[in-house]
Amino acid sequence: MTDLSDELLPTTRRALLHRLAVAQSEGRAPSMVAGVLRDGRLVWSGARSMVDGHAPTTDVQYRIGSITKTFVAVLVLRLRDEGLLDLADPLGRHLPGTPADGATVAQLLSHSAGLAAETPGPWWERTDGALRPELADILEAERPLRHPAGRVHHYSNPTYALLGALVERLRGEPWGEVLRREVLEPLGMDRTGLLPEHPHAGGFAVHPWADVLLPEPLTDTGRLAPAGQLWSTVADLAKWAAFLASGHEKVLSADTVAEMRRPAVGPEPGDWSGTYGLGLQLIQHDGRILHGHSGSMPGFTAGLWVSEADGLAAIAFANATSGTRTAAVAAELLALTAQHEPRIPEPWRPLAEFDEQLLALTGPWYWGAAPHSLRLTADRGLELSVLGRAGRAGRFRAEADGTWTGLNDYYAGETLRVVRAADGSVSHLDIGSFVFTREPYGPAEAVPGGVDPQGWRVY
């Protein structure tokens, strides 16, 4: 075991090591290595191996499989943020001639373009990419679509091959080179790449009925590489997890990273365990929402999860094709850390400054007869809470024009306006046409449809 910090309590470190050891033993993995981050910093790592005294370190490379897709999604969103494409653009506008010409970039990122899950011909993960030299080779010509675009979530590896090709078309160079220059180098991830570099783990299959091993082939998957080719280390993916938590000024803003982890599409029919954003999986585990991705390639499994609410992330690798449930192990390591050492909240502090006019907006408001409260937050923000049994809450960001924009739930993207009477006093609040007044259904002139002139009464 390698322990990187004394910040975690001994009981926490023991619990993490125990979970990792059980997973390696019961999953019959030749080796496993894992790490936990707190507030963007690697605070624990551990490893187990079939070879006594020779456990992998956080610098040993493993194949990370579909975690690669999160990197490709970042490259695509960089293109969007630079104005080179729009997520609503059909793929054919930028990469014409594929079976997905009509699918939007957003649908491709969220696996809702309806494309087939796998390629035609032999299993692409164990065969050389030279078998599929062109984009036309990665999908069946007769039936490339399994569902109408935009209707359902259907996980598709060829989809991310198309996104990698999109990056190449708009950047004019191989996507792996774009990744190295635009993402890996700014984040200091010098142990992540398309092909392994020493030291790296070898991949194995473990016989289902006997404790014997079969080495798995090491293949370059060519056009399919954006779906799962990358190799990385716990130390490097710790930097990636920190980025997926808060962004990086040289790669993607925090706002765009938050957009990635917003649910874009539901799970496959009949599976309500998780959903998908723009290149990120979202799952529910132990009462918390995690974002990240699982990964597998012949000889390897991997998992990376981030809990925004807890300020935690966890990574786990194994060098066995199946049996280790590595993504579940990563989620459990995160949950164990949160259980043993729950996040300590920041101390309450008063606002550094405030506007008297905004302070006057705070307090009770009514949508019809449903009571709410409005409070002032940092940076002139507003927070609407429900006081009764009916209503909708929301957080709002202040805009330069004197309005506010909703940040979550029903009011996300909607505009909050303060409507004033002829004398300049506040008449009511308007949130996407919903009127909030200081009294239940009053003043009458502010309420849509008016108010019965006889007012409130007893029947």
Image (spheres, helix red, strand yellow):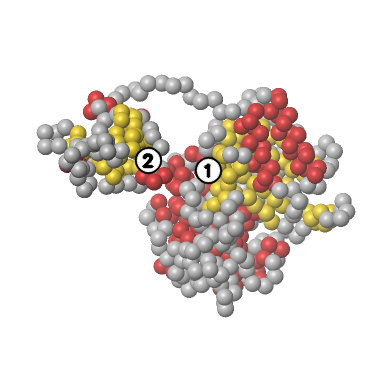
Q: Is 73 on the left or on the right of 327, as rendered? A: left
Residue 238 in view of the camera: no
Is mark 1 in CB contact (under 8 Å) with mark 2? no
Q: Say what secondary structure mark 2 lies in.
A: loop
- Residue that lies at the very extreme toward the bottom in this rendered image: 142
Residue located beneath label 1 in the image = 244
Q: Nearer the viewer, residue 290 or 368?
A: 368
Residue 211 placed where, x, y %?
87, 51
Instruction: Work out whether 111 lies above or below 144.
Output: above
Q: Nearer the viewer, residue 457 or 56?
A: 457
Q: Is 248 on the left or on the right of 273, as rendered? A: left
For the point 63% across and 31% down, the residue is 339
Specify the amino acid type for callout 1. Leu
Sort mark 1 into few (<14), some (14-19) or many (20+) by Cα contacts within 10 Å. many
Q: Say what secondary structure mark 1 lies in.
A: helix
Specify the amino acid type for callout 2. Gly
Residue located beneath label 2 in the image = 391
Instruction: Work out whether 148 lies above or below 2.
Output: below
Residue 150 in view of the camera: yes
For the point 71% across and 25% down, the residue is 11
Residue 441 placed where, x, y %?
25, 39
For the point 47% across and 41% down, the residue is 248
Residue 156 placed where, x, y %?
58, 62
